[in-house]
Image (cartoon, rainbow, N blue to C red):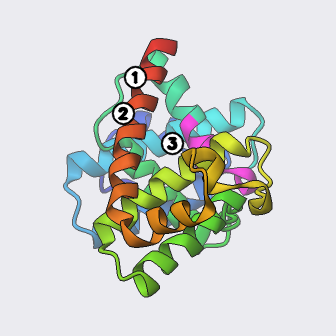
Amino acid sequence: MQQFFEDSRIIEPLHQGPLTEHFGSYILLLKQQGYSRSSAQAQILLISRLSQWLERNGIETCTVDACTLQRFLRDYKRKRRVRSGDAAALARFLVLLRQKQAVPDPQPAPVSAQRRVTAKFQRYLVQERKLSQGTSAYCVRFAYRFLCERFKQGGVKLGCIRASTYLRHGHVTDTYWYLTSTPELLAAAGKRLEKRWEVRNAKQQ
């Protein structure tokens, strides 16, 4: 710490809160990555204020995660100017805490039923229908928005969907030709529907 701060009156307040035991590791990381003295000073001050904030709010180190850092930054903005690199410095420090096993690794977010279905749909379009990545992406975005609108509660029941109903075709064979023979039309329809959704959302706001 002394290599970055010569005044003991500055150093003493920095050693407060539950994160102080990890300061040495973070300072070593900053040296290894070649940060300038001024940048290192700013990052150390930021982490020390995070440590003090955790102590004031009764938050233990083992519970710190990305959401905790976002809450800290929101409070921090009310009192001080947030630097452009502050969020990155906090994220870097969180990675260090995970590497030292001071905090648990983040749990992967659960994949929604809509995402699972559209992932299979995209594989089908690319591998079997041989569509380009761009065309398949439009189709998948259209399908995802449709599934979210149709199944707002989360569960996707594909057996309830009848393409002929939504496309207003009188015969199922017409729907089959529409979907299999001209997939580019589906991409174009997706673009137009996205524009309609954007207009509708803008009006609602």
Q: Is residue 3 magenta?
A: no
Query: Looking at numbered disc 1 in the image, what kind of residue is underneath it?
Result: Val
Query: Looking at numbered disc 2 in the image, what kind of residue is underneath it?
Result: Lys
Mark 3–mark 2 Cα distance, whole angstroms, equals 47 Å
Seen from the viewer's position, the closer of residues 65 and 135 is: 135
Q: Does residue 129 appear left or right of residue 164 in this picture?
A: left
**Mark 1 in CB contact with mark 2 (< 8 angstroms):** yes
Q: Is residue 74 above or below residue 189?
A: above
Q: First in sequence, mark 1 or 3: give its number.
A: 3
- Under circle 3, the secondary element is helix
**Mark 3 in CB contact with mark 2 (< 8 angstroms):** no
The residues colored magenta run: 61-70
The chief SS type of the magenta part is: helix
Query: Which residue is disc 2 drawn over?
Result: 195
Q: Is residue 123 above or below residue 20?
A: below
Query: Which residue is disc 3 drawn over?
Result: 48
Mark 1–mark 3 Cα distance, whole angstroms, equals 46 Å
Query: Which residue is disc 1 drawn over?
Result: 199
Mark 2 neighbour density, 10 Å: few (under 14) some (14–19) many (20 or more): few
- Under circle 2, the secondary element is helix
Which residue is at a point 45% across and 72% down the rendered structure image? 180
